[in-house]
Image (spheres, helix red, strand yellow):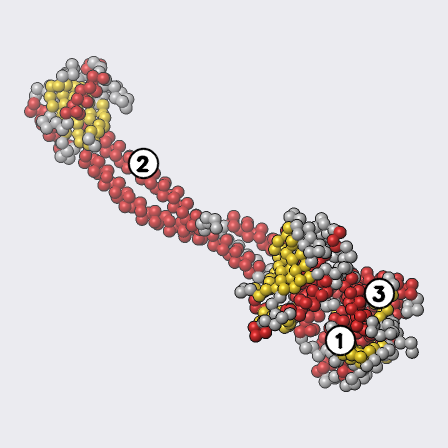
Amino acid sequence: MSFNIPFRWKIALLLTAFSGSLLIGFGLVSLNLVRWQKLARMDTQIQALATRLPANPSGRGGIRRMEQSIEWILGGERAYLFFLDPSGRETFRSADWPDEWLAEYLVNDLMVNPPPAADSGTVFNSRRGANPGGGPGIPVNLRFDTLTRDQKHWRAGAFITGESYVWVLISLAPLESDMANLRARFLLILIPALALLAAGGWFIAGRTLRPLDNIASAADRIGAGNFSERIQRAGNAPEIDRIIGVLNIMLERLENSYQQALRFSADASHELKTPLAILQGTVEEMLRASDSDPERQQWCLQLMEEIVRLKRITANLLLLARNDAGQMVLHKDGFDLGRELTELVEDAEALRDPPVAIKLNIPANIRLFTDRQLFRTVVMNLLGNAVKYTGLADGVTVDANVGPSAVSIAISNGGPGIAAEDQPHVFNRFYRGRDADSENGEGIPDGHGLGLSLADEMAKAMGAHVALAESRPGMTRFEFTLPLDVVERVDESTENNPG
Amino acid sequence: MKVLVAEDEKKMAALILKGLKAEGCVVDLCHDGNTAAELCFSRPYDAIVLDIMMPGRDGLSLLREIRRRGMSVPVILLTARAGLEERLEGLNMGADDYLPKPFYIEELVARLHAISRRASGRAESILQVSDLTLDLLTRQVRRGERIIELTAREFNLLELLARSPGRVYSRTMIFEQVWDYHFDPGTNLVDVYIKRLRKKVDEPFASKLIETVRGIGYRLRKDEA
C-alpha cells in the first residue's frame, strides 16, 4: 500500500507547519529587536555618562564617583573603566577589572584603529559608521562593541576625553538572563499556540472538506441506482460549487441516458417485436401454404432463417438493454450442477464437427439455487467460445469447484490464445479480436460478437462474475464465479459416488 | 372450438385468425380492449387470446375483470413488452399461459389446444404419427409396442416435429424452440441431435420417420392416410 495521508490531515499539518514557522520567525525577530533596543539604551546611557567623565584619570576620586553613578544608572550593574594615554599606555583601570585578556584586546584595538586628532571633532571610526559632529573636548562619537570572552558577554564603549582614551566595559550578563527569560516565555506560549493552530487547522480542513463529503455520499446514493439525486450546493464556497455544478450537469445527462435506456428496453422491445411477429407469422403462413411446392418452401425457410437470426440478436440486445436499465428479474430455481453442466457440455461438444472433446471435472451432488436460464446462458456462451477457438487435439476442460467463499467454474481451452491487446476488450459488446475468423472456428459461423459480453452481463445480473483468468498460446481460461449463497445443498453422504 | 382473439395490431390479428381457422377454430376478432370486454362478457368462448397492450383497455385489467366475475374460460396472454414476460411468470394473474412476441402461430395453436384440453378435462395428451406415439404427460415415447428412451432434449425435439407432421423446420427454427438459453449456436448442434434421435427412433425400424429436406431442414413424415 502506498503512503497515503488523508487530505484533512495534510491540510491541518501544512497549516500548522506554515503558521508555526511564521510564528517562530516573528518571535525570533522580536527577541532580537528587544535585545537590540536594550543595547541601544545602554549605549545612550554610557554616552550620557561620558560627558561627565573627568578629563584626567589622575582625579581618582572623581572616577570612582563616575563608576558609582554609572552603576546607579544601570541599576546596580558593575561598570569598569579603562584609561589609556595617546601612546597606548595604560593610565587607569578600575579595581577588580574582570579579565586581563579583555584589557589586552582593548589596547590592541586602539593600536589597530588609531584615533584621529582630538580636536578634529571625530573620534574613532566606528564599525557601524562614524558620527561626525560635536565640539572639541566634548566626548562624543562613541564607538560601541560587544565582546565575548569565556561565554561572558560585555558591552564596550570607547571615546576620547581630554588627553585620554577611555573604555567603559559593562557586563551583559543581566541582559542575557533577561533575554533567556523572554525566550523561555516565548517557548511557553509557542507550544499551546501551535497546538491551537493544529486544532484550528483540523477544524478548518474539516469544514472545507465537508462539501466534498457531501459530494461523495451523494455519489454513493447515485451509484446505488438513484439517478434523480442531485448534490446540494455548499453555498459559501464558489470553487466547490463550481465542481458541484459540473457534476450535477453530468448527472443530468446520466439520468437522461438512463431514462432512455429504460424507455428503450420497454418501447424498443415492443417496436421491434411487433413487426418481427408479423413477419414471422406471414412467413409461417406462406410456409404452410407451400407444402406442395418445394422451391417456394425453400424460399420461405430461407426467409425464416433470417427472421430467427434477427429475433435472436434482438432478444440478446434487449436482454442486455434490460440489464443496463436494471430491470432484470431473476427466476431462481434449484437444480443439480452436475446434470446441468453435463447437458450443456453435451450441447457444446456437438457445436463442431468432428466433435471437440470436453473433459468435465465436477464434485458430485451439488445443487444450486439461482436463475437457471441465465446460468445456462453464461456457461453455454463460455463453452461456445472455448469450443470455437480450441485446437481439436487440445479439447476443452471444465473444472467446477465449491471453494470456501465461492463456486467457481473454470473453462479452459487450447488454441492460439487471445492477443494481449485484445484481452481487455473481450467482454465488450460486438468486440471481435483480430483472429475472430481463424481457421479453428471452421464449421461454426461467426457469432455476432455478443456471446462473451452476454455471459459477462448475465453473470453480473446473477450476482456472479466472469473473468478472463489467463490467456497465452496453448491455454486460455475463463472463470465463472458464483457467490457461495447460490449453493442450495452439498450432499456429502453420496460424495464418493462415481460419475 | 370457439376462440376470441383480441389483438390491436391488425396484420398480426389476421395471421392469428388465419392460423386458427386452418385448425378448424371459430374465431371472433377484435382490435381494442373495450370491444373485447363486450364480446367476452356476452358470448361463450372456449378460449380467449388477449394482447396485453391494446387501446381502450389493456389485456391485464380485462383478465382481472374476467376472473373477478368468476369466469374460468382459458386465457392466453400475448406480450411484446420486455420485462412483462417475467412479471407474468412471477405473478399469478389468472392467465393459463402467455406467449412472448414474436411467436409461431403454430405454437399458439398448440398451446390453445393444450389449455382447452386441460379445461375440458379430456386427456388428449398423446401425439401420434404413424406408429410413433408421444405421451406428453408421462413423456414416454413408443414405436409400435417398443418403448424408446429419450433424453429431455431429444424428447422436446421429437415433440416439435411430431406436432405438425409434414412441416419442414429449419435448423435455426428448431434450435430456437427446443433450446432455452441465449446463445448463437450455428447449425451443427441441431444436426447432431437429429442424428442421435434417428439412431433411437429410426435405425431399429424399417420405415424411417425423420426426413432430411435437402438444404432446408428436417420434418417428420406425414401419415400416408
Establish if A188 lies above or below A88: below
- Chain letter of mark 1 equals B
Q: Quadrant of residue A479?
A: bottom right
Nearer to us of marks 1 and 2 is: 1
Name of the residue lying farthest toward the right: A292
**Mark 1, residue position:** B149
Between A462 and A387, the residue placed more toward the observer is A387
Residue type at mark 2?
Answer: Val
**Mark 2, residue position:** A29
- Disc 1, disc 2: CB below 8 Å? no
**Mark 3, residue position:** B217
Q: Earlier in the sequence, mark 3 or mark 1?
A: 1
- Chain letter of mark 3 equals B
Q: Quadrant of residue A465?
A: bottom right
Real-space CA distance between mark 3 and mark 1, rounded to the nearest whole angstrom = 24 Å
Q: Residue B18: where, in percent of width, then height? A: 87, 73
